[in-house]
Amino acid sequence: MTQGEKLYEGKAKILYATEDPQLVIQYFKDDATAFNAQKRGTILGKGAVNNQISSALFQMLEQQGIPTHFVRKLSEREMLVKRLTIVPLEVTIRNIVAGGMAKLLGLEEGIILKRPVFEWHYKSDALGDPLINDDHILALGVATTEELEFIRTQSHQINGILKAYFAQRQIDLVDFKLEFGRFGNRILLADEISPDTCRFWEQGTKKKLDKDRFRRDLGDVEAAYQEMLNRISPSRSG
Ligand code: 5GP
């Protein structure tokens, strides 16, 4: 699979065309941004770590019956994925209060929720990905009722699978963000699942092993990403 023209460059990844119009290469960068790109930096080795973590998680989810855009890992920083039209929505699922929910409702971080909280955010850098509801989405024609139902059901299933997977590795899955895309008449899980897009707390110590170390200047950012990779694929990371 050879790398063709650059199709899109985002904050953490670049998409390249391939000779197959249905497939694109997702290249993972070391660049990190936070607070709607007001804070910028580099997390050395992040691209390679996130590609490995994301590849392992997509493969695991596929085995559990979740359709994703993942085709295969091509190299240290490159993943071959199906070419989708991204639905301009970000799904957040929360199991424990942190980040945006703590701020929105004036809550302490760490409250264990009685049931997962599902949120839609409209994908817009200019607006800071605002929280929206089904009515906004349907009234504006961003997605159909069927698409919303499918994405909601898939997201809850993914949460169940990931929560159990990380619990086996002594990690609490606090919250995470998902994106989905249209591929023909199907909806596939897209983007990445990594310490950039999830909050991971080590059980017992509550040590943060995710991008909050970068966002909040907590130090040991690279080590935290590497620690998550070690827990996910101990034999390949070393
Ligand atoms: P919050 O709404 O609390 O800021 O984020 C909730 C979860 O979704 C966190 O795990 C966070 O990393 C992820 N998340 C939400 N929005 C974004 C985003 O625009 N980019 C990335 N990388 N992660 C996001």
Image (cartoon, helix red, strand yellow):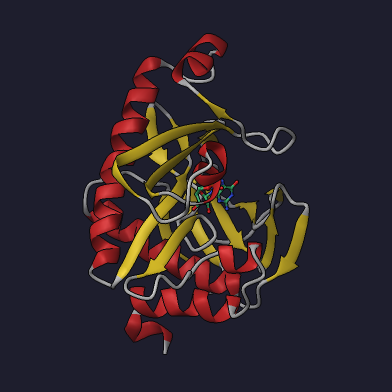
Residue 66 vertical position relative to residue 41 in the rendered view, above or below: above
Q: Position of residue 143 (x, y in %)?
A: 48, 20
x 46%, y 56%: residue: 198
Q: Which of the 4 image quadrants contains residue 205?
A: bottom left
Farthest residue, direction top = 139
Q: Where is residue 39 in the image (x, y as percent from the top left)?
A: 76, 58
Q: Where is residue 136 in the image (x, y as percent from the top left)?
A: 53, 16
Residue 56 vertical position relative to residue 198 in the rendered view, above or below: below
Q: In this view, does 13 lie to the left or right of 37?
A: left
Residue 55 vertical position relative to residue 219 in the rendered view, above or below: above
Farthest residue, direction bottom = 238
Residue 132 vertical position relative to residue 29 in the rendered view, above or below: above
Residue 75 shows in the view: no
Q: Which of the 4 image quadrants contains residue 164?
A: bottom left
Q: In this view, does 23 lie to the left or right of 170?
A: right
On-image quarter of the C terminus: bottom left
Q: Which of the 4 image quadrants contains residue 168?
A: bottom left
Count the labels in the image: 0
Q: Is residue 8 left or right of residue 143?
A: right
Residue 4 shows in the view: yes
Q: In this view, does 59 lie to the left or right of 69?
A: left
x 63%, y 60%: residue: 3
x 41%, y 66%: residue: 201
x 36%, y 66%: residue: 56
Q: Position of residue 195 (x, y in %)?
A: 50, 63
